[in-house]
């Protein structure tokens, strides 16, 4: 079972797995090096978390998540939003009665945001299925309750530690023993 704690690369336990910010690491040791290698993702940051292999996809009630691996870095991120069993693509909106859902990226981040707007009356024009309910909601249509849900996110890269030289080696450089 992985440990939900932040490991120290110098003293991690060989073959032990750790979960840090939704990334699962494996501690590897050789006589000259210790490596924390990101092997997958974790849905939560707890020891009993559901684990995802790199490339896997999972969904909960508000988001669809993917565990990506690129350039020695694992990334756990939302790739779209959910409303019940309906997927809402980033940049899209969905209306259900007097409720509107908008899926968007956070301000230049890898976070996904699901905005839920509830209209507390039926007095504003609801438009058609893919149109915005009103142009300027605050002035033209008072009585809107808004909630925003932010997705989980985690990223982690490989860490090489040279036991002899007592230095970290960047993952983009070849290790030399």
Image: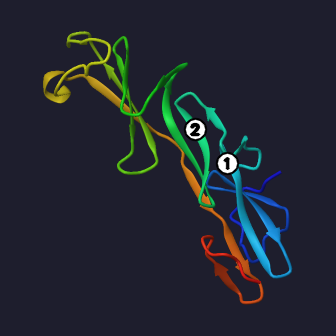
Which residue matches tag 2?
Answer: 65
- Secondary structure category for the residue under label 2: strand
Front-most of residues 175 and 45: 175
Residue 125 is situated, as x and y percent measured from the top left of the image, at 20, 12
Residue 117 is situated, as x and y percent measured from the top left of the image, at 34, 25
Is 129 located above or below residue 163 in the figure?
A: above
Res. 41 mark: 1
Q: Residue shown at 44%/29% (left/top)?
A: 89
Q: How many marks?
A: 2
Residue 123 is situated, as x and y percent measured from the top left of the image, at 20, 10
Question: Residue extending furthest left?
Answer: 139
Front-most of residues 171 and 22: 171
Is 165 located above or below residue 74 in the figure?
A: below
Residue 44 is situated, as x and y percent measured from the top left of the image, at 65, 45
Q: Are marks 1 and 2 in contact (CB under 8 Å)?
A: yes
Q: In terms of image quadrants, where is residue 174?
A: bottom right
Res. 106 mark: none
Quadrant for the C terminus in the image: bottom right
Is 110 located above or below residue 80 in the figure?
A: below
Q: Which mark is first along the chain, 2 or 1?
A: 1
Residues at marks 1 and 2, CA–CA distance in whole angstroms: 10 Å
Q: In terms of image quadrants, where is residue 6?
A: bottom right
Q: Residue shown at 41%/34% (left/top)?
A: 90
- Secondary structure category for the residue under label 1: strand
Q: Residue shown at 72%/73% (left/top)?
A: 9
Front-most of residues 72 and 146: 72
Q: Residues within 10 Å of mark 2 (few under 14, many from 20)?
A: many
Q: Residues within 10 Å of mark 1 (few under 14, many from 20)?
A: many
Colouring chosen for the image of the structure: rainbow
Front-most of residues 107 and 124: 107
Q: In terms of image quadrants, where is residue 131?
A: top left
């Amino acid at each position: 079972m992985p440990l939900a704690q932040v490991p120290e690369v110098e003293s991690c336990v060989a073959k032990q797995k750790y979960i840090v910010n939704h990334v699962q690491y494996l501690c590897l040791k050789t006589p000259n090096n210790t490596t924390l290698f990101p092997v997958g993702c974790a849905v939560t940051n707890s020891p009993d978390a559901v684990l995802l292999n790199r490339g896997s996809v999972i969904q909960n009630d508000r988001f669809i998540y993917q565990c990506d691996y690129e350039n020695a870095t694992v990334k756990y991120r939302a790739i779209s939003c959910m409303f019940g069993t309906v997927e809402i693509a980033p940049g899209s909106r969905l209306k259900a009665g007097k409720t509107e859902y908008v899926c968007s990226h956070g301000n230049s981040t890898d976070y996904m945001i699901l905005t839920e707007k509830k209209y507390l009356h039926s007095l504003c024009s609801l438009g058609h299925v893919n149109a915005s309910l009103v142009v300027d909601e605050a002035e033209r249509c008072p009585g809107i309750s808004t909630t925003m849900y932010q997705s989980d996110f985690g990223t982690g890269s490989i860490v090489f530690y040279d036991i002899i030289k007592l230095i970290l080696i960047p993952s983009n450089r070849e290790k030399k023993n």
